[in-house]
Structure formats: structure tokens, C-alpha cells
Amino acid sequence: MRSARIMIVLLVVASWSRVDAAPYVDEAVQDQWFTGSLEAPSPALTKAGSIAVEPYAIYQGNTGAYGNNWGHYSVAHDLNQLQSVTEIKYGITDQLTLATTPLFAHSWNDQTTSSIVGVGDLPVELEYRLNEMDRKTGSPSLTFALGMNFPTGAYDRLRTSLDGLGGGAYTAKEGLLLQSLFDTWGGHPLRLRFYGALFEPLASVSVNDVSVYGTSQGFHGQASPGLAQELGLGVEYGLNQQWVLAFDVVQYYANGTRLNGTNAAGNFVNTRAGSSVSFALAPAIEYNLTSNVGLIAGVEFSAAGRNTSSYIAPQIALTIAF
């Protein structure tokens, strides 16, 4: 299975012990401040009672779409969206963390806008860090995540499809994250985060009228969303204690959704969308005011894909830990 291959790759990467760079970890590495790259998740917090908050401001503009043969083409009425995304973490113990990421968004295109600022589905997860990262050898920490996406976002009976920010289904998440820190020549620390996550909808959802699944007014039926996965690598390179260059490479994959029901004319509908895949890049720069407060700004953009939209998404975030 695809998910099994992800886990195998992650466990193989977990076996790395050091990098062929400078043989010793100097003070620059020990004292380096990081905010975190734009896309890679962070490990479980290291202290019970600690809190980390990272609000993002994101503009996403679609720039066309990729077809089934990976070719890119233009699309009429491309979507634009302003997003407010905030990652919130609380350390239950020194190794176990509770995390959530509420999302709010407003969408528009050249024809209409969403009715209100909408709320997306709400992910809640527990993260458990199995071991500590070894800064001397580069041996990574390993964090497991287990969570649920709660269907709080609107997905059907919409005034316009732009109002849809949810999927309607309770979705289980399983994830792994590896984090390592290495020394390089000249005392420039290099931090790597390699991660994978699997998302599994737990049931079909009832769909009525206009929905995020492409249905129109008068449709009544069910949608069965497919499995989805995310796989990525985040790299951070310290220029000095405060300034850091960051870069992410991310793959997104989703099985197609099965849709069945009847449309407004009373005709039976039974379709299955093709699976989709996309590859995204996200360069960024960090400025860390202290070890607990930092800013990051950058842009995520699609580099290739199949059966999915292309986009560009400049964004900025503030990280605060206390």
C-alpha cells in the first residue's frame, strides 16, 4: 500500500546518524534559533505546560490546472482566497502534545465572492515524541501523530461553491515526523524535517444541492472521499543566530471521490473522480527575535501536478512559544 511505502521510507531515513560535514557540533549549532519552515510540521513540545502559537496570513491565487496527462492549462474564473491559519500546541507532558489548527478564509473570483468569512474543518491531534534529537551525532527525533479532522466547514447546501471550506467527513490522520540538526562548514547549522501523513475519511457523507464536490442545485446523494497523503522535506540553513533560509518540497496525493445520487432532472449520477497528485515548493526566510519568537515569510507554489489546480501562495507567520 502507498501508506506502507511512506512509513518504510520514513523508518529508513530514521536510521541516519550523522552527515559528512564538520566533525564536531560547535556553539553556533547549539545556540541557533529557528522558526520552522513554512510547510513542515514541528515535533511535540519538550516541556509539560508549554504553549506554542503560530498564526499565518496566506493569500492563495489559483493559476490554472493540471490535466490527467500532467499538462498545464488555463482555467476561467480562477479562485482567490485569503486565509487565516493558526497552529496552537499545548504540552501535556514533556513528550506528549495536543495540537489544533483552526482555519478561516474568504474566497472570490472574477464573477462572485463567498458569502462570509468561512470556517474550515478543524484538525485536532496528539503528538508523541519517542526520542530526543541528538545534536552531536545528527540522530533524529521521531514524533508520531494521531488525530481527527472534524467536519466543521460548510460543504453542501451552498449559495456558491466558494462558500465551501470543508469536506463533510470525519477524517482520521496518522503521521510521522523526523527532525535532525547538523553542523556544516563555517558554523552554519542545518536542520532537516522529513514527514509523512495519511488521511482516511471514516464514512461517506450526504450531499445536497451546490457542494464542494461539484454538484449543483437539486442534487441529492452521497460522496465517498478517498484516502489522501502528504509527504515532505523541510530544510533550514542558519546564516547566523537570527537569520535562517528555509525551503520545503511537498507532495500531495488523493484518491478520487466517488459520487452517486440524482440531479435536478431526476437522472441518476454515479461518477468517480481520478486521483490527483501535486508537487509544491516553498522558499522562505526567517528572522528570529529570540529563541521563542520568530517571523517567517515566503511563498508556496505548485511545480507540477495531475488532476489538480496550480497555485501560488505568499504567506507570513509569527511564532511565539512560552
Image (tube, rainbow, N blue to C red):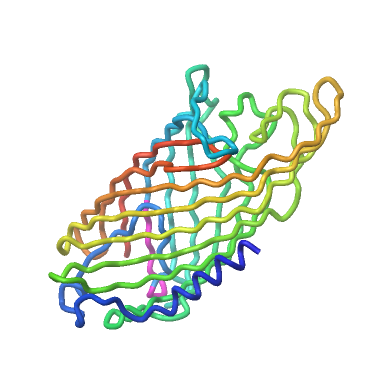
- In the rendered image, which quarter contains the N terminus? bottom right
Q: Residue furthest top?
A: 111
- Position of 56 with respect to 78 (left or right) is left
- Against 203, residue 187 (above or below) is below
- Against 112, residue 49 (above or below) is below
Q: Is 151 in the magenta?
A: no
Q: What residue is at 55 percent from the left and 65 percent from the top?
A: 6
- In the rendered image, which quarter contains the C terminus? bottom left
Residue 250, image x, y percentages: 44, 53
Which residue is at the front of the view, 84 or 281?
281
Which residue is at the front of the view, 22 or 177?
22
Residue 20, image x, y percentages: 26, 77
Dividing the picture into quadrants, the one containing residue 18 is bottom left
Magenta span? 46-54
Q: What residue is at 51 percent from the left and 21 percent from the top?
A: 77
- Against 268, residue 138 (above or below) is below
- Position of 166 with respect to 204 (left or right) is left
Residue 305, image x, y percentages: 51, 42
Which residue is at the front of the view, 90 or 8?
8
Q: Residue furthest left?
A: 186
- Against 4, residue 281 (above or below) is above
Dividing the picture into quadrants, the one containing residue 54 is bottom left
Q: Is 53 in the magenta?
A: yes
Q: Give the total number of marks visible in the rendering.
A: 0
Q: What residue is at 75 percent from the left and 52 percent from the top?
A: 203
- Position of 92 with respect to 314 (left or right) is right
Q: What residue is at 44 percent from the left and 76 percent from the top?
A: 14
